[in-house]
Amino acid sequence: MAFALSSMSVTSPAFANHQAIPAKHTGEGEDVSPALAWQDAPAGTKGFAVICHDPDAPLVKEGSYGFVHWVLYNLPGDLQELTEKTATGTAGMNDFGNNSYGGPMPPEGHGTHLYYFWVLALDHQTSLPEGLTLAELLQEVEPHLLGMNRLVGTYQRG
């Protein structure tokens, strides 16, 4: 299946769609991942992956644009939420060079950036190794993608 939006919905108790991400979840605060929840996953979902990406970052790396803040996978298909500062799943490599969540921290004076928290529904439970980059994860899961959707948060450095 192509990377197209599905009817799955993604929410967070920390911020509403297209609203400001609290400083707690940014590089200027505690830098902890926000809680996320999703509903209406496609039939046959057996696993999930979560990505946070900032397409507004003025970077191009290995042919892709923006900045990857979070790559999380090996999430079971019966999961419907992640708690704040979750330890669930397997972390991949973000563009800070860490296997963890790295919150928003746009360049000073760069204005408001959009942060896409993607949830990908997969037709099988993955058991991928820690430390995959976003490109490596997408190569692994694209053939198994049933649907996806996102929650968009905003942040401007103070």
Image (cartoon, rainbow, N blue to C red):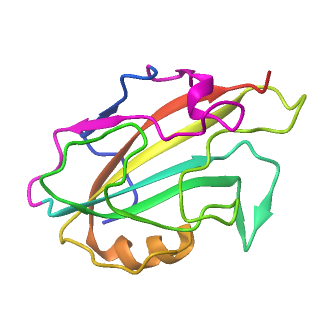
* Residue visible at 56% across and 25% down in the picture: 21
In this picture, which residue range is highlighted in magenta?
16-44
Q: Where in the figure is residue 37, as x and y percent of width and height?
A: 28, 36
Which quadrant would the N terminus be assigned to in this image? bottom left
Asked if residue 31 is positioned above or below residue 126 in the image, the reply reads above
The part of the image, by quadrant, that contains residue 36 is: top left
Q: Total label count?
A: 0
Asked if residue 109 is positioned above or below residue 91 in the image, the reply reads above
In the rendered view, does 151 fall on the left or right side of 66?
Answer: left
* Residue visible at 43% across and 47% down in the picture: 118
In the rendered view, does 97 fall on the left or right side of 143?
Answer: right
In the rendered view, does 105 fall on the left or right side of 148?
Answer: right
Q: Nearer the viewer, residue 46 or 130?
A: 130
Q: Main secondary structure of the magenta part?
A: loop
Q: Where in the figure is residue 91, as x and y percent of width and height?
A: 45, 64
* Residue visible at 51% across and 75% down in the picture: 132
Asked if residue 74 is positioned above or below residue 127 in the image, the reply reads above
The part of the image, by quadrant, that contains residue 155 is: top right
Which quadrant would the C terminus be assigned to in this image? top right
Residue 76 colored in magenta in the image:
no
Residue 27 colored in magenta in the image:
yes
